[in-house]
């Protein structure tokens, strides 16, 4: 029994590390509503315009995304139409791949940025939401940025113009461990804190959708199944009463 408990604890250790974040940072809870098409559309716009330059979402196609989040292919082509054919027409069936190639990314960041198709599903919505709001200036890193949730991450803060520039404040305990205490604003961005948090909630909502697009279909089918069972249950009850009326 003791060996079993040790095995379980070791298996859960990575998950507990991800949940806690770096430097003792706590994850903020985010409410995700996959039926909020305005949030999904804004999240898709942020992802395509700011994230897709380096990160792919190679399990998602533009036309599938447009259909699921309530956009027409014409709207996607107008606002997100980076993928074109030889005639310059938007390829709606194209996969959402990064515009930078692997070699250029390796040279710029010393690593190839990961595919983000399932990042919100693997890490969790709270992790992604907190991570995107936890960048701070750090002149010791190659990019000049760091992150409280993911210390020494290679990714720079691509949304700094929205959020602004922050400085992280840490305290060191008696054991020499650094603990995050909060952020100090160095330079404000184009958005207020409330506006930026909402934008990151929208982006997180889109990332959760992208991690499991069929989830929307399952929710809709689930409603139909429950309605059918309720409807069928009435006739099943009446049939049961008819079969057992002679017995009772």
Image (tube, grey):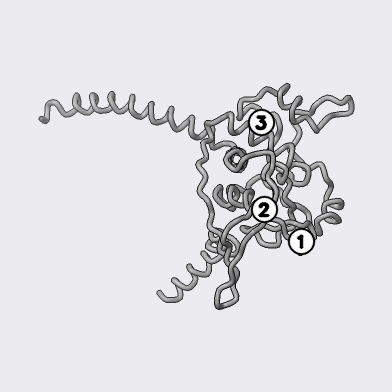
- Residue 97's place in the image compared with 79, above or below, is below
Graded by Cα atoms within 10 Å as few (under 14), some (14 to 19) or many (20 or more), the crowding at tag 3 reads some
Q: Judge depth for marks 2 and 3 and give the one in front.
A: 2
Secondary structure under badge 2?
strand
The residue under the point 43% across, 27% down is 224
- Residue 56's place in the image compared with 235, above or below, is below
The answer to whether 59 appears left or right of 129 in the picture is: right
**Residue picked out by circle 2:** 166
The answer to whether 243 appears left or right of 116 in the picture is: left
Numbered mark located on residue 139 in the image: 1
Which residue is at the far bottom? Answer: 175
- Quadrant the C terminus occupies: top left
Who comes first in sequence, dot 3 or dot 1?
3
Q: Quadrant of residue 2?
A: bottom left
**Residue picked out by circle 3:** 64
Residue 143, given in percent of the width and then of the height, sits at 78, 57
Q: Is residue 129 visible?
A: yes
């Amino acid at each position: 029994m003791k060996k079993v408990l040790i095995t379980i604890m070791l298996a859960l250790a990575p998950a507990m590390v991800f949940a806690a974040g770096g430097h003792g940072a706590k994850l903020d809870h985010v409410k995700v509503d996959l039926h909020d098409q305005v949030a999904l559309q804004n999240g898709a716009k942020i992802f395509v315009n700011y994230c897709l330059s380096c990160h792919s979402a190679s399990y998602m196609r533009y036309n599938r995304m447009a259909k699921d989040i309530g956009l027409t292919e014409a709207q996607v082509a107008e606002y997100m139409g980076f993928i074109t054919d030889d005639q310059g027409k938007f390829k709606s069936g194209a996969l959402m791949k990064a515009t930078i190639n692997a070699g250029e990314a390796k040279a710029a960041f010393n690593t190839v940025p990961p595919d983000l198709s399932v990042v919100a599903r693997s890490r969790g919505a709270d992790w992604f939401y907190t991570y995107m709001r936890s960048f701070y200036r750090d002149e010791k890193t190659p990019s000049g940025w760091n992150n409280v949730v993911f210390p020494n991450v290679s990714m720079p803060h691509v949304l700094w113009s929205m959020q602004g520039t922050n400085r992280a404040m840490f305290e060191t305990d008696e054991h020499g461990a650094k603990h995050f205490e909060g952020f100090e604003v160095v330079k404000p961005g184009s958005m207020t804190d409330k506006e930026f948090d909402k934008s990151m909630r929208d982006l997180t909502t889109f990332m959760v959708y992208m991690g499991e697009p069929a989830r929307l279909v399952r929710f809709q089918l689930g409603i139909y199944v429950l309605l059918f069972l309720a409807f069928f249950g009435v006739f099943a009850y009446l049939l049961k009463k008819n079969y057992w009326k002679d017995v009772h």
